[in-house]
Image: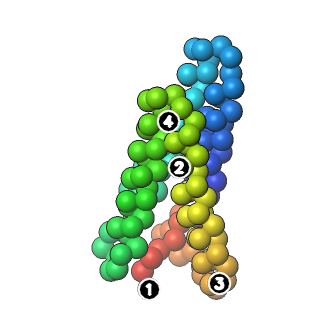
Amino acid sequence: MLFDGCLRFTTAAKRAFEEEEFTKRNEDVNNNLIRAQNIVTELQSSLDMSVPGELPGTLYRLYDYVMHQLQQANLKKEPEPIDEAEKVITELRDAWFEMLGQNPEHKISGDQQPGSLSLQA
């Protein structure tokens, strides 16, 4: 799932801060944060904004916040904004898992990618 991939890259970025060699540390932090940002961009761009209600707009703003935190972590080379981004992504992931668990008959249609979910009824 994309959420897990994002968390994997943010964890790798935080581990990279422990690297003693300056150039390798900055390169590893940057590369992992860019990968996490790419996943957040994909999540944000896959939102169906035509779905009625507040959910698409709320998710868009949450992804925007996560993206900002990841950019700040990369720009300032500080791990704290990564923690904030991870909190949001973890909560979103857990909410999707809970929702899917309450709706076990949910099946992926032929035009959906595995790990995606249509918000339309």
The vertical placement of 31 against 97, above or below, is above
Tag 4 and tag 2, C-beta contact below 8 Å? yes
Which residue does the numbered mark 4 point to in the structure image?
Answer: 73
* Residue in front for this viewpoint, 60 or 79: 79
Amino acid type shown at disc 2: Ala
Name the quadrant containing residue 2: bottom right
Tag 1 and tag 4, C-beta contact below 8 Å? no
Q: CA distance from mark 2 to mark 3?
A: 26 Å
Tag 1 and tag 2, C-beta contact below 8 Å? no
Secondary structure under tag 2 reads helix
Q: Nearer the viewer, mark 1 or mark 4?
A: 4
Residue 28, given in percent of the width and then of the height, sits at 60, 26
Q: Which mark is residue 105?
A: none
Which residue does the numbered mark 3 point to in the structure image?
Answer: 102
Mark toward the start of the polypeptide (2 vs 3): 2
* Residue in front for this viewpoint, 59 or 35: 59
Q: CA distance from mark 1 to mark 2?
A: 30 Å
The number of numbered discs placed on residues in the rendered structure image is: 4
Residue 57, given in percent of the width and then of the height, sits at 34, 67
Q: Could you tell me which residue is drawn at 38 percent across and 61 percent down?
A: 60
Secondary structure under tag 4 reads helix
